[in-house]
């Protein structure tokens, strides 16, 4: 093996990692834990038209946009994927991903299962990780605590979660997200990234 080939093997291309799963499964909590732990990833900020929740900050938790601004970005093809979920728009900006990958940074984006399905069609060599609740009952408890949902709204989200779990074959990995096991969830995500870096045939994502 030549020196160039050795160097290429030891320096695999940056990964594009898609974290998905049902609403309330703990996607935000896992990513927040990873950020605080100092994992060397670029975290793509999702754009949304939904109102800020208590404690959320624009440019830190999400890009909070007006519906008019969001629609304009749709028209100018600035999103990798976008969707309207529970009455609000969510989208993944292309430019941020392109710049991060060009800089050689492993890049993580959080999307719902519908968004992951779209990205899979566009970037099949991304790494797709599904966060799974330990049970539907546990997911129901989390949604009640987080959103204070009424019974009809709770039933709607739980039914959607059941449908989303049926999309597991789309993903490369599944991680069980326990309420009291956030450290383990983060450790497993990082282990997946480490394993991907050891592939003899690395994934190459071009956007």
Image (tube, grey):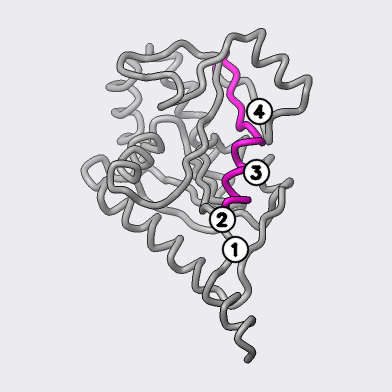
Could you say which quadrant of the image residue 95 lies in? top right
Looking at the image, do the residues carrying marks 3 and 4 touch, with CB atoms under 8 Å apart?
A: no
Q: Nearer the viewer, residue 148 or 202?
A: 202
- Residue linked to disc 2: 104
Could you say which quadrant of the image residue 138 lies in? top left
- Residue linked to disc 4: 82
- Residue linked to disc 3: 98
Give the residues in magenta: 86-103
Q: Position of residue 6 (x, y in %)?
A: 57, 83
Labels 1 and 2: the sequence-earlier one? 1
On the rendered image, what quadrant is the N terminus found in? Answer: bottom right
- What residue is shown at x 50% (from left), y 45% (from top)? 108
10 Å crowding of disc 1: few (<14), some (14-19), many (20+)? some
Most distant residue in the bottom direction: 1
Examine the rendered structure and indicate whether residue 128 appears above or below residue 196. Answer: above
Most distant residue in the front direction: 3
Looking at the image, do the residues carrying marks 1 and 3 touch, with CB atoms under 8 Å apart?
A: no
Looking at the image, do the residues carrying marks 4 and 1 touch, with CB atoms under 8 Å apart?
A: no
Q: Position of residue 68 (x, y in %)?
A: 66, 8
Q: Nearer the viewer, mark 1 or mark 2?
A: 2
């Amino acid at each position: 093996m030549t020196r160039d080939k050795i160097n290429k093997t030891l320096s695999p291309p940056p990964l594009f990692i898609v974290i998905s799963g049902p609403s309330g499964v703990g996607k935000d909590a896992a990513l927040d834990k990873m950020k605080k732990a100092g994992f060397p990833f670029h975290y793509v900020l999702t754009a949304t038209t939904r109102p800020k929740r208590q404690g959320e900050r624009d440019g830190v938790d999400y890009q909070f946009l007006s519906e008019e601004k969001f629609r304009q970005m749709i028209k100018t093809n600035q999103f990798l994927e976008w969707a309207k979920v529970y009455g609000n728009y969510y989208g993944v900006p292309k430019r941020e991903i392109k710049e991060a990958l060009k800089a050689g940074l492993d890049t993580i984006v959080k999307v719902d299962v519908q968004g992951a399905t779209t990205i899979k069609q566009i970037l099949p060599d991304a790494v797709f990780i599904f966060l799974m609740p330990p049970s539907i009952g546990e997911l129901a408890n989390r949604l009640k605590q987080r959103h204070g949902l009424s019974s009809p709204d709770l039933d709607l989200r739980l039914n959607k979660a059941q449908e989303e779990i049926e999309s597991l074959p789309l993903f490369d990995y599944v991680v069980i997200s326990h309420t009291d096991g956030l450290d383990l969830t983060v450790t497993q995500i990082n282990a997946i990234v480490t394993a991907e870096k050891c592939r003899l045939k690395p994934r190459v994502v071009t956007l």
